[in-house]
């Protein structure tokens, strides 16, 4: 991926990585090279044919856009641009491994859009916008597999087609269980109704179950 330092969300048919809002000086050269390498690796892992631009930000404008508690975010291609925007907020004191895991999480979202499962707040044409963050299908998958996907980079290998299929199949199973357990229950009861879902994708810690 080509490194840049300016902030520009426009598309140009080239995958790029931008170090902005202090990250360009706070991170070491080795850290920046590793993050660039990881981003390119994930795009190859998922065979994403859309343009993906990655922004590594320390704080400031992008952080305020995503919310004070956000560690990363993804924006799908829009009517006025054809590229995915992935942003990861980094603390130079945190481990490089944790930065790469956050990047893997957002790259999973880019993959979900690229393969056609995620469109806005719809998952496979069903609207899940009313569900809590933890129960949205795209977050179940991203949280459930971000460490595994980061492992593809750490192990310097590409996942097999069967590995990727197993991931999506497990997500399908989790969403099916989610739909069964949640049904028409009130939002306040939903987390209690998805213990099985949490177990399926290893999200027990996230749900506090």
Image (tube, grey):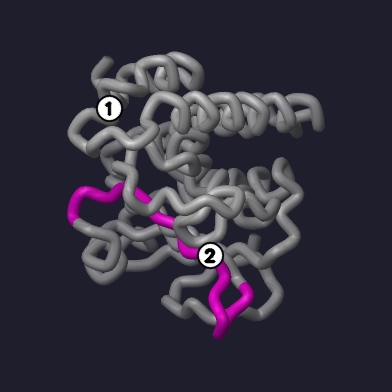
For the residue carrying disc 1, how many other residues have a C-alpha within 10 Å: few (<14), some (14-19), or many (20+)?
some
Secondary structure beneath dot 1 equals helix
Tell me which secondary structure the magenta stretch mostly adopts: loop
Percent across and percent down for residue 177 are 49, 24
Residue sitting at x 22%, y 58%: 67
Q: Quadrant of residue 190?
A: top left
- From the image, tell me which residue sits under label 2: 76
Secondary structure beneath dot 2 equals loop
Percent across and percent down for residue 80 are 55, 85
113 to the left or right of 19:
right
Marks 1 and 2, how far apart at CA: 27 Å
Is residue 71 highlighted in magenta?
yes
Where 205 falls versus 31 (above or below)? above
Percent across and percent down for residue 130 are 32, 50
Percent across and percent down for residue 35 are 52, 47
Where 43 falls versus 203 (above or below)? below
- From the image, tell me which residue sits under label 1: 191
In this picture, which residue range is highlighted in magenta? 68-82
Front position in the image: 67 or 165 = 165
Front position in the image: 130 or 27 = 130
The residue sitting at the front extreme is 184
Is residue 62 highlighted in magenta?
no
Front position in the image: 42 or 162 = 162
Where 192 falls versus 52 (above or below)? above
Residue sitting at x 60%, y 66%: 16
Residue sitting at x 79%, y 26%: 162
For the residue carrying disc 2, how many other residues have a C-alpha within 10 Å: few (<14), some (14-19), or many (20+)?
many
Please name which of the two marks, 1 or 2, marks the residue nearer to the observer: 1
Front position in the image: 123 or 202 = 123
Asked whether residue 154 appears in the rendered view, the answer is no
């Amino acid at each position: 991926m080509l490194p840049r330092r300016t902030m520009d969300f426009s598309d140009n048919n080239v995958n790029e990585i931008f170090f902005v809002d202090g990250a360009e000086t706070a991170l070491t050269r080795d850290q920046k090279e590793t993050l660039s390498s990881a981003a390119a690796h994930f795009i190859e892992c998922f065979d994403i044919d859309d343009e993906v631009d990655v922004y590594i930000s320390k704080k400031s404008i992008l952080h305020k856009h995503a919310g004070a508690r956000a560690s990363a975010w993804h924006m799908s291609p829009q009517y006025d641009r054809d590229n995915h925007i992935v942003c990861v907020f980094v603390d130079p004191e945190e481990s490089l491994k944790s930065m790469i895991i956050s990047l893997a999480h957002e790259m999973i979202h880019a993959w979900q859009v690229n393969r056609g499962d995620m469109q806005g707040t719809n998952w496979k044409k069903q609207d899940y916008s009313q569900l809590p963050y933890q129960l949205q299908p795209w977050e179940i998958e991203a949280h459930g597999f971000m460490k595994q996907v980061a492992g593809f980079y750490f192990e310097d290998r590409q996942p097999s087609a069967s590995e990727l299929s197993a991931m999506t199949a497990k997500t399908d199973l989790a969403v099916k269980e989610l739909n069964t357990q949640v049904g028409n229950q009130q939002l306040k009861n939903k987390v209690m109704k998805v213990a099985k879902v949490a177990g399926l994708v290893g999200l027990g810690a996230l749900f506090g179950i």
